[in-house]
Image: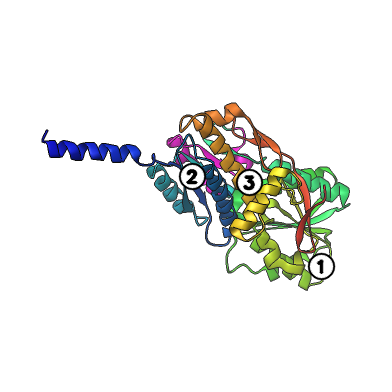
Amino acid sequence: MHPLKLIVYLCCLLLFSCSDPEPIKIGFIGGLSGRVADLGLAGRNGATLAVEEINQAGGINGRKVELLLADDQQNEAIARQNISQLIEQGAVALIGPMTSAMATAVLPLVNEHKMTMLSPTVTTESLTGKDDFFLRICSDTSTYSARMARYLGQQRGINKVAVIYDLANKTYTEDWFRGFKQEFEALGGEIVFQKAYHSGPDVRFSEFAQAILTHSVDAVLSISAAMDTAMLSQQLRKRDFTKTIAAPAWSATEKLIEMGGKAVEGLIVSQFFDRQSQAPAYLQFRQKYQQRFIEEPGFVSVAAYDATGVILTALLKEPEQAIKETIIEIGQFHGIQQTFHIDRYGDAIRPTFITQVRDGQFMALE
């Protein structure tokens, strides 16, 4: 080799050896635009904070972690396209999606590529007990719907309920309604009105409210996203409905209070997040989150932070290899509010809280 070429070659080797190692890439997929963007944006923030913290601590065995972001737009085709792009970009695992509809839509693709997909918030029962590449850090809908039914029926003495549910996320909402109805009726309660709809700008919640109030009801259950639950609550309160309004965790983002205002005061939610938690890890997270994003963290940002922590814990143990198997082998994880367990099917078990909106804040009741 010519001496000059040899020098150039050696310089290139030296430069390459001194450069930073290739980052470990983790994909995040969620709705970052549209009617359910409150879930995706909060999830992105929680995942971002977890990645920033691991990088500040030196990364994974000296390698930085890079978070790749994708917006599924709550559209099945776009979600699948974006999953493919994340895989092509070298993601070793995925955080998300944030809704059950998107999770079921992309699961065949994820299974085909044997790509670990860990969701912070997906609870559909259709994915429970399956040996696939979908994992989650929350219980399925049966836990939350049954808890709500027992609370309304036993604690509140409610006997007659009207229910509306959004078919845009029907794998979640139909599960939730079915679980609630079964438990509520077993306790002697009655569903006196039910209405399925598909969320969108043309939905007239005034008509829903009017139809509900033609029945004698003790409570209204809105199995919908925050925006829709806020709009229905406003229409009910305008018509002097003073009784209980309830909703699943899907509604319980900060957007509910922002949009609903006084109309959502007293609203009841069942979820796995305690905003009054005094756990030291949560208090530290909350302070960092407020400083980083200039807002309060909600259940989605906490869940995404925990989910990202699970992936990072697995990578620290076995970098980029058998991530699903490593997560299941570890089994028990310390979230920032409580410890939770992920079983051999990738399903999680964690405590459930009944929460109420009081003075513009979510307050845990039990």
Quarter-of-image position of residue 14: top left
In terms of depth relative to the viewer, which is nearer, 69 or 146? 69
Residue at position x 63%, y 40% in the image = 137
Residue 326: say if magenta.
Answer: no
Residue annotated with mark 3: 303
For the record, the magenta segment spans 101-129
Amino acid type of the residue tagged 3 in the rendering: Ala
Residue annotated with mark 1: 241
Residue 312 placed where, x, y %?
A: 54, 38
Callout in the foreground (3, 2): 3
Q: For the residues marked 3 and 1, what is the alpha-carbon distance in whole angstroms?
A: 33 Å
Residue 276 placed where, x, y %?
A: 77, 51
Up-down relation of residue 72 to residue 146 (above or below): below
Residue 250 placed where, x, y %?
A: 66, 53
Residue annotated with mark 2: 106
Question: In the picture, which quadrant includes the N terminus?
Answer: top left
